[in-house]
Amino acid sequence: MSTVVVFSLLIGSLLGGRFRIFILPPAIILGAAILGAVSAWHGDGAAHTVVMILVFAAVLQLGYFCGALLVRTRAAVYRGKAAPSLDSQGIG
């Protein structure tokens, strides 16, 4: 279960840094299908599979939020800085 949490957090942060909110539903559906297939292959029970998919979806959204927040914060910091001037460096 902890592997699912770590990987869904990483995947969510990558998606949050790159895409808009509309990527979450397809990512959750694809991840749920993969987790369901792997759980069935391992012979896990239905309750365990459902809990794992719910944890995956929740942590994926948390990772998405953190990744998007990080990218927006970094963009705001860089936007606030003034561009270096060649005159202030004594060149020219």
Image: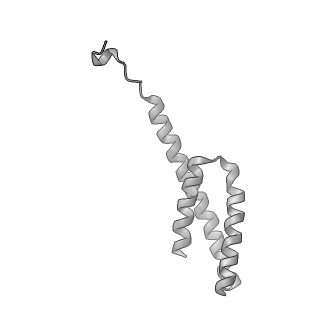
Badge count: 0
Residue ID at (67%, 56%): 24
List x then y, in percent, for residue 92. 31, 12
List x then y, in percent, for residue 42. 64, 85
- 7 on left or right of 81: right
Q: Is residue 63 above or below residue 89?
A: below
> Quick one: which residue is furthest to the left in this view?
90
List x then y, in percent, for residue 65. 57, 52
Q: How is the image coloured?
A: one colour
Q: Is residue 33 above or below residue 20?
A: below
Nearest the eye: 85 or 55: 85
Q: Quadrant of residue 57?
A: bottom right
- 22 on left or right of 14: right
Residue ID at (60%, 61%): 60
Q: Is residue 74 above or below residue 54?
A: above
Residue ID at (54%, 66%): 7
> Quick one: which residue is furthest to the front in this view?
92
List x then y, in percent, for residue 12. 58, 57
Residue ID at (27%, 15%): 90
Nearest the eye: 61 or 42: 42
**Quarter of the image where the N terminus is located:** bottom right
